[in-house]
Image: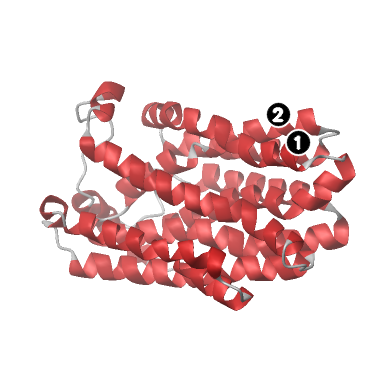
Amino acid sequence: MPRHARRWFIYVLLFTLLAISMLDRINMSVAGASTAKELKLSPTALGYLFSSFLWIYIFCLLPWGTITDRIGTRRSIGGATILWSIAQLCTGLAPGLVAMFGARLALGVGESAVNPGANSVIREWAPRSERGLASAIWISGSLFGPLVGALLVSWLVADFGWRLSFVITAAIGLVWSTIWLLVFRRPENARWLSASERSKIINERGIERSGAGPSVGYRGLLASPVMWGLAFTQGCMTYTAYFFLTWLPGYMQMSRGFSIMQSGVYTALPYGFAIIFCVAFSYLSDRLLDGSSPNSGARRNAVVFGNLATATVLLVRFASSINVVVMLLADE
């Protein structure tokens, strides 16, 4: 990697971080039918396992944001990844519903640190002129995780059983956390950066050093209309993405009669298309929206356009062809 572009290694780490977190989430979706069969779980009990992850996730987001601000991104992300990887391992070893339910809750606690931590890393490492692209690379991990995970987990479940799939995905997370703790530092302290690149990052990232600015606290955040708008937008996006993440593999197996491997392939395809569009549109955003855009509302308009475009997913229920379903999901 060129000496003047080593910050891209951090972008790659964030990409793989989100990919691994999504891989661990989709594991239960793909393995759900096999898990329910072995443990004799009803559809209702399986639904509880799918949703239990989110029950605790939402309540841990704000605390993890505070923890990240206080102890730094290196320790918060590294510790959280170890926590959820152990939870993923325990899911594969669980003897019954209660133990598996507890492991899924622990997974939610750990993975809720991803978004606050990764956003802080982008603000620390990305010059303003490429922040949109850096964010797109990171967010693409949420698409790459299901893309690869649907195929990998389908193969593991079909050939080796659902328990081994959880053990292997847990091991991937533990390996990643080791690399992160060994390599990651803030730009000011990263010895593997050249002096010129360190200067570029610090001078162009457009933020003060962590802890130097005033804190508005939870009350200030909750009183901000902008924050509520961002929360509502993110909530809609997350609900839609997670709905298909959990629903699509089972739908294709139960309603379309596909095998585990076939459902994995068709689940992966929309995410592959989405990665391409995500990076392309974010690159154009950085090129077309200048430094005054945050104040002019141009970036807000871009977000509105993107969310309206995803509304085509509502047509899925009217599609009679699986190929049409895949195309509509790719738009999402």
Q: Nearer the viewer, residue 31 or 72?
A: 31
**Could you say where residue 165 lies in the image, as x and y percent from the top left?**
77, 52
Instruction: Give how far across and how far down residue 184 sits, in percent.
Output: 46, 46
On the question of residue 15 being in view, the answer is yes
Say whether residue 17 is left or right of residue 89: left
Whether 278 is drawn above or below 243: the answer is below
The correct choice, above or below, for 178 with respect to 132 in the image is: above
Q: What residue does disc 2 label? A: 102
Q: Which mark is residue 90?
A: 1
The answer to whether marks 2 and 1 mark residues whose Cβ atoms lie closer than 8 Å is: yes
**Disc 1 element:** helix
Residue 210 point in image, percent of width and height? 28, 34
Taking depth in this image into account, of 187 and 76 the one nearest to the observer is 76
* Residue at the image point whose x is 59% and y is 54% from the top: 245
Residue visible at 30% across and 46% down in the picture: 123
Drawn side of residue 147 relative to residue 27, left or right: left
Which residue is more in the foreground, 99 or 292?
99
Residue at the (69%, 51%) spot, across then down:
29
